Image (spheres, grey):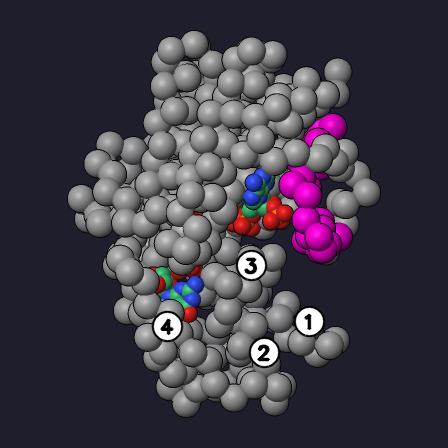
Amino acid sequence: MTKSALITGVTGQDGAYLAKLLLAKGYEVHGLVARRSSDTRWRLRELGVEQSIRFIEGDLADAGSVQRAVIKAKPAELYNLGAQSFVATSWDQPVTTAMVDGLGVTHALEAIRQFSPETRFYQASTSEMFGLIQAERQDESTPFYPRSPYGVAKLYGHWITVNYRESFGLHASSGILFNHESPLRGIEFVTRKVTDAVARIKLGKQKELRLGNIDAQRDWGFAGDYVEAMWLMLQQERADDYVVATGVTTTVREMCKLAFEHVGLNHEDHVIIDPQFFRPAEVDILLGNPAKAEKALGWTPKTPLVELIQMMVDADLRRVGRE
Ligand code: NAP
Ligand code: F7E
């Protein structure tokens, strides 16, 4: 029998890759989409899956709409990827961030608890919950210390997932994913901001690139690899929490260098430090230990950062070239 999946955040970076993965596995894929005044489906078009998705209108902040989506899709698996996911915005819109990224998780879990308790649930947790790191390499047992309203809201979402698993026996898993990028990454995130700028500078459409704290370090992987880990979590007999990371950390500065070098340019000739991109509180360094996911799920990251950045620069060169 065809399995049904419901993805919240289906129009986002991960939603698009996950939809493609599930469709390839033969799932019927439903996507919860919030009402927007302009088109948000470009990623689904780029991956060629827009026509195959059954869209259901709804908003994670609106409990009734999430319930109706669960009743309509009758999903065997619900992937809760919808979120206000940009950390910097979370200081400007802390309440929206808490509503969607925090309470929105409860809305999804409640819908399952009341109307579809057999549905398996995936929560998109994040390395931002580690924030001011309490261990050199972060794993599932590392204490959390979020540093942004986003991190705080996500921590609530994480614990409510654990709590519903323990309270009601739901098959609810939380993937603690470290930064993952792709050519479909939103332009506001640092990797894509850099690769888009590199393409524009190379093609003579831009001269400089303004960045904030380029000494920050991140454990960056490829989104296409990471959605496989999400799926694997929901195929396990028991629900659990897993860190998904590469185990390698790199500064923003070094990531820039890789991107500029790929087109024969020197980042030092173009990058300008601009205080407007510094954050009220920073996560200085993240470095994940994915040993549990590797052992229990058989998952390993496949794409090194240099390959990922080159893939992103090449995609942006093609896009900017078409403009
Ligand atoms: P993204 O590209 O920003 O996508 C977010 C998605 O959430 C979009 O489809 C967006 O819809 C949707 N959304 C926003 N507000 C909503 C609402 N009120 N109701 C329903 N949907 C809403 O994020 P991503 O990079 O794919 O990340 C996916 C999830 O993983 C997010 O929960 C993020 O916080 C988490 N995460 C991401 C990373 C990472 O490095 N990418 C790491 C750890 C965890 P619109 O298109 O209409 O705005
Ligand atoms: O910043 C620094 C910035 O916005 C990375 C989200 O997917 O991953 C993402 O959150 C680092 C930070 O991602 C600029 O200060 C310097 O230290 O690409 P980012 P993020 O904040 O790590 C986690 C795991 C998530 O869960 C989130 O949803 O880069 N940085 N200069 C800059 N960052 C941006 N955006 N722009 C700059 O100009």
Up-down relation of residue 94 to residue 230 (above or below): below
Looking at the rendered image, the disc whose residue lies closer to the viewer, 4 or 1, is: 4
Q: Earlier in the sequence, mark 1 or mark 3?
A: 3
Q: Which residue is mark 1?
A: 319
The answer to whether the beta carbon of the residue marked 2 is less than 8 Å from any atom of ligand 2 is: no
Q: Is residue 235 magenta?
A: no
Which badge, 1 or 2, is on the more N-terminal residue? Answer: 2
* Any part of residue 127 in sight: no
- Position of the N terminus by quadrant: top right
Question: Mark 3 or mark 2, which has the lower sequence index?
Answer: 3
| Residue at x 39%, y 38% (from the top left corner) | 154
Q: State which mark lies toward you, 3 or 4.
A: 4
* Front residue of 32 and 224: 32
The residue at 44%/51% (across/down) is 93
In which quadrant of this rendering is ligand 2 seen? bottom left
Quadrant assignment, res 283: bottom left
* Residue bearing the label numbered 3: 186
The answer to whether the beta carbon of the residue marked 3 is less than 8 Å from any atom of ligand 1 is yes
